[in-house]
Image (cartoon, rainbow, N blue to C red):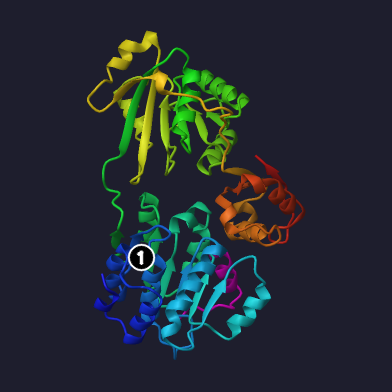
Amino acid sequence: MNFSTLSLPQEMLTNLDSLGYKKMTPIQAEALPLILDNKDVIAQAKTGSGKTAAFGIGLLNRLDVKKFRVQSLVLCPTRELADQVAKELRKIARFKHNIKILILCGGESFGKQLGSLSHQAHIIVGTPGRVLKHLNKDSLNLENLETLVFDEADRMLDMGFMEEIQSVLEYVPKERQTLLFSATYDNEIIEISKKIQQNAVSVKTVSTESANKIDEYFYEVSSKQDALIKILSTFAPENVIVFTNTKIEAKELAENLQKINIDAIAIHGDLEQYERNDVLVQFANKSCPILVATDVAARGLDIKELSMVVNYDIPHGSETYTHRIGRTGRAGHDGIAITLYNSFEIDKAEEYRNDTRKFESSDSLKVKAGFEMKPQYVTLVIEGGKKDKIRAGDLLGALTGDAGLKGSSIGKIDIYDRQSYVAIERVLIKEAHAQLSKGKIKGKKFSVWIL
């Protein structure tokens, strides 16, 4: 676990020691030998795991200071992360003089960046949108690139940067080392890896291969709606799918919850496609914590991290039950599945009894005084999309530039043909709406409204 076990120059080891890098973290111990061996690596690593040093030591060790060309590019989802990464790289780079690291992000003066690029740099750290803008204007040259890093790749996908990433890839050499770091490790990330990496070696310091860990509870109740409110108050889940057996019940339940300050939206077979899009976007981007759904309407719904599933009605058959509850407890996270039944449904409920499922009294469920559920984000809708050549970087630039928001206050970005959806922290939504309404995106005015 000591850095001295790696094939690194002594001056780098001395500098790492002075910075307090005594022992390698698990991600560093597993990924660094592979990175130093010039392998493509796909690594599951959360913020604070030491991933920046893992790829930073690798790309700095490979760097030729005398070759004053861009040799490494680190792509980050937000300006804040890019600043943080560049700061860490500069510390690690102290072992050698004249290593130039440049940040290219939206919300900063493009002209100033042009001036900095005219003097060249060894390492670029930036957001996909702004990096692509410089590539399109020929102010950035990546012909000599040797290492390409995607930091927090899952967040970049959430923020809608896939199109920009694909465009950036057209400017980089095919022969290169590509390192991909992501907090989650789902099929989407694996598919991206296949497209952008060559024989990537997988590094996981957090096991996600185990079966879903789901705690299953069954409660006999007199009023299902009252019991649901108690469950939400007692367990305090971040997001929930509540399954009903009929679309009328889904619609009514969502409306009733809204009346008592519990944010809920319903998805059922009577919705038009645009209404369905609105509902799914809001739930997926954390603009609404509760989705009330029928089985048919929930088909194809993929939420990466779902805290809880509630069977408001007992499902028609064990196969449907398994399919419903399998939506929670994914990717190494714990899940909770709760089934409600009344005195008329006792026989149906008993069919599900086994050694692992907990049949408990609803007396243990309580509602806290003043209980309500409000979302982390609210969705801003821009009446422009792919057909208007709007990219995620354009929206991020407008919000972090003129509107003055931090990238960390912006959640998931979804861009459709004619509309774009951006999740904004709830406390900032009015300010963001006002600024974007009077501002421009790509030099054009677009209608903006709050969903």
Task: Single out the residue that lies furthest toward the left.
Answer: 355
Q: Nearer the viewer, residue 237 or 41?
A: 237
Mark yes or no: residue 138 visible. yes
Quick check: is 140 in the magenta stretch?
yes
- Identify which residue is drawn at 35% across, 83% down: 14
Residue 255, x across and y down, in percent: 59, 24
Name the residue that disc number 1 marks.
197
Looking at the image, residue 307 sits to the left or right of residue 388; the answer is: left
Q: In which quarter of the image is the C terminus?
A: top right
Task: Single out the residue that lies furthest toward the right.
Answer: 438
**Which portion, as a residue range, is magenta?**
128-144
Quick check: is 370 in the magenta stretch?
no
- Identify which residue is drawn at 65% across, 46% down: 427
Q: In which quarter of the image is the N terminus?
A: bottom left
Q: What residue type is labelled 1?
A: Gln
Q: Which of 170 and 115 is in front in this view?
A: 115
- Identify which residue is drawn at 48% across, 63% down: 166
Does residue 333 lie above or below 314 as drawn? Answer: below
Residue 55, x across and y down, in percent: 38, 71
Does residue 254 lie above or below 186 as drawn? Answer: above
Residue 239, x across and y down, in percent: 48, 37
Looking at the image, residue 391 sits to the left or right of residue 28; the answer is: right
Does residue 388 lie above or below 121 as drawn? Answer: above
Task: Single out the residue that lies furthest toward the top.
Answer: 344
Q: What element carries label 1?
A: loop
Residue 432, x across and y down, in percent: 69, 51
